[in-house]
Amino acid sequence: MGRFLTHAFILEKYGPRLDKHALADALRIAASTVMNRSSDGTLGIRTYTDHGKLWADAEHVAEYFDRKALEAK
């Protein structure tokens, strides 16, 4: 889709940063799986905690999807 379009789509649907529930929805996995993969470093998306909650920037989520699309080719 292209990085700009992917980022624009994620921004429109979820906003500039995604909490664990939005990230789980985008990845189509359970929120607990997001937490587990994030803590063991296998999620593939840069995450951070802010006030005790897990977050990912929309830009990093877009990069992840674009990277996976290239790998699939």
Image: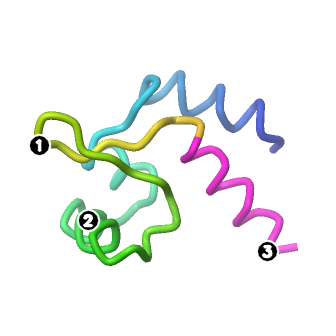
Q: Quadrant of residue 30?
A: bottom left
The picture places residue 37, in percent across and down from the top left corner, at 33, 73
The picture places residue 12, in percent across and down from the top left corner, at 53, 22
Q: Amino acid at mark 2?
A: Ala
Q: CA distance from mark 1 to mark 2?
A: 19 Å
Going from the N terminus, do you reach mark 1 or mark 3 first? Answer: 1
In the rendered structure, find residue 36 and report the number of the disc placed on it: none
Q: CA distance from mark 1 to mark 3?
A: 35 Å
The picture places residue 61, in percent across and down from the top left corner, at 55, 47
Q: Nearer the viewer, residue 45 or 9?
A: 45
SS of the residue under disc 1: loop
Magenta includes 15?
Answer: no
Q: Is residue 72 above or below residue 61?
A: below
The picture places residue 1, in percent across and down from the top left corner, at 81, 44
Q: Which residue is mark 2?
A: 30
Label 3: few (<14), some or many (≥20) within 10 Å?
few
Q: Which residue is mark 1?
A: 52
Q: Is residue 56 above or below residue 64?
A: above
SS of the residue under disc 2: loop
Q: Amino acid at mark 1?
A: Gly
Residue extent of the magenta highlight: 60-73
Q: In the shown orientation, is residue 47 left or right of residue 2?
A: left
Q: Amino acid at mark 3?
A: Ala
Going from the N terminus, do you reach mark 1 or mark 2 first? Answer: 2
Q: Main secondary structure of the magenta part?
A: helix
* Disc 2 to disc 3: CB gap under 8 Å: no
Residue at (26%, 49%) from the top-left corner? 20
In the rendered structure, find residue 72 and report the number of the disc placed on it: 3
Magenta includes 63?
Answer: yes
* Disc 1 to disc 2: CB gap under 8 Å: no
Residue at (67%, 49%) from the top-left corner? 63
